[in-house]
Amino acid sequence: MGPIDANYDAAFFFAPDDFLSQGDRLDADLLILGSGLAGLMAALRAAERAKAARIILLTRGALGASASRLAQGGLAAAVGEDDTPARHAEDTVRAGRGANDRRIVERVTQEAPKIVRRLAAYGVPFARTTAGAFHLSLEGGHTRRRIVHAGGAATGRAIVDTLAVRVRSSATVSVFERTAAFALLDDGSSVLGAVALRADGSVGSGEGPGARTVRPLVVRARATLLATGGVTALFGRTTHPPEAFGEGIALAAGVGATVRDLGRIQFHPTALDVPERPLPLLTEALRGEGARLLNAFGERFMPRYDPAAELAPRDVVARAVFLERRRTGGVWLDLRPVRRLADRFPTIDIALRSRGFDPDRAPVPVVPAAHFTMGGIETDASGRTTVPRLYAAGEVAWTGLHGHNRLASNGLLEAAAFGGWAAEAALDEPPLSLAERRAAEAAAAKALGRLDAGRVRLTPAPETLAALGAILDAGAGLARTPEAVERALQALSTLAEALPPEAVFDALAVSAARLVLSAVRSDGGKTG
């Protein structure tokens, strides 16, 4: 596909000296925003289904840079001899406090073994037993060992890197790295594509010293799939990379898509307590292999909070860790009961030792951190949102799977399942009409007309993210009060008023944060 698609109308009306004329204009059958597991799976499934389809994938960083790639524990699936999808479904509903959509739960858990086999066929190096079966781990909330994993607590990296290689080699998928969409193209009723900015390789003033200038990219598409991740990177204490700051949710809400349960944030109980952002994660599988939580008095406290102790659902453990930190001054994870830690969890062992911790000699400090967005853009069972031609998959979406609390390792499963289903449904969308194509061009011109190419950056400014982190930790963290939420909303309004017009991604981050705080205000302060 060339820089200007031959299918574009001859009457494309931008002047030669317009900002847009410096960029690219493309048409696609499917436009995918984001390259985590959901986006990569969508690209592969679409390419397999329609060899002649024009698939375009835009990603802010390198292909695969995402929260999916940081996932440690693994992917949940009933592939063990003593397990069934029905049991997996019951564990999912129990962890979700019964607020799950049971039809979705049953569909996803039934599909899970097929997804594992498909990923293995793609080349994902899942750990195996000496007999060749999948080696399975145990995590909180599960009543059976059903977590397939790879790379010694580097499952996300193994899956994403494997799929990224296949996407790069696909003749059907065009990948644009260092490219971020800042507006959806719509005609008031349907989404018709997106307008994005690309780092064009030359050094300029757009992102500070050594930054690269940007150029526009307009993609008109029969269907647009958001796979941009959740909002948890906006929190101060977070396990998520900066790519997942909620812009997909803000974009969808901006064109009228329904957003649900965005105040339901899952906090992982065992992030390493160090002055970093994101915080290194200590996978739940460690507790499945015997690791114990201790308070500042050296007491094991989880049995007081739940009979399942360290293997209680994440919301229970996170709340207990939060309370014990406040009561005693700190919480530590004792990894000494885990046999052969360096062999079984090499990435974690290396991460700890590189930061000066010796897990063989002493427990390591942990803190709850924002980890997963259980709410998001409402979709049906095929990833369709409430706006025609717009789809969503992965953490950006609300599918009904998780309820009030996500069962451990159901996140990668959901992303893989809905990424494929959404792509298949999206390819059934009809071609854009001439009126829709013209409407997309007009929307692109309007969006780009507000920009100054030399002053736009592809990410929110560090100071914006720092301010948002403090605001959300105070108003939407584990300790929520109506007064704290109102103070946070007021601080957010002050921050928004100070943003310059060219700070388009800062504005999207602020919009996402406002959606979170507004949801917290309306749902009575529930965390998940």
Image (cartoon, rainbow, N blue to C red):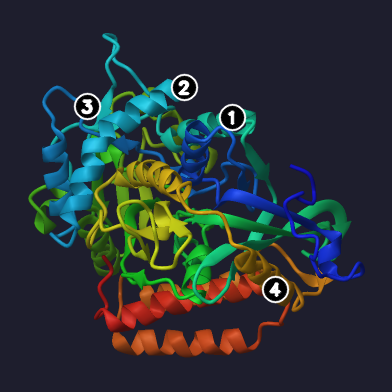
Q: Residue at x 52, y 40 (%)?
A: 43
- Which residue sits furthest right? 17
| Residue matched to label 1 | 165
> Mark 1 or mark 2, which is nearer the start of the sequence?
2
> Is 41 placed left or right of 95 in the picture?
right
* Disc 2 from disc 3: Cα separation: 18 Å
> Mark 3 or mark 1, which is nearer the start of the sequence?
3
> Is 292 placed left or right of 496 in the picture?
left
> Is 208 placed left or right of 184 in the picture?
right
| Residue matched to label 4 | 442
| Residue matched to label 2 | 123
Q: Secondary structure at mark 1?
A: helix
* Disc 1 from disc 3: Cα separation: 26 Å
Of marks 4 and 1, the one in the foreground: 4
> Mark 3 or mark 2, which is nearer the start of the sequence?
3
Q: Amino acid at mark 2?
A: Gly
Of marks 3 and 4, the one in the foreground: 4
> Mark 4 or mark 3, which is nearer the start of the sequence?
3
* Disc 3 from disc 4: Cα separation: 51 Å
Residues 287 and 275: in front is 287
Q: Residue at x 40, y 28 (%)?
A: 119
Marks 2,3: beta carbons within 8 A: no
Q: Residues within 10 Å of mark 3 (few under 14, many from 20)?
A: many
Residue 95 at x, y = what percent? 17, 53
Residue 24 at x, y = what percent? 78, 55
Marks 2,1: beta carbons within 8 A: yes
Circle on res. 79:
3
Q: Amino acid at mark 1?
A: Val
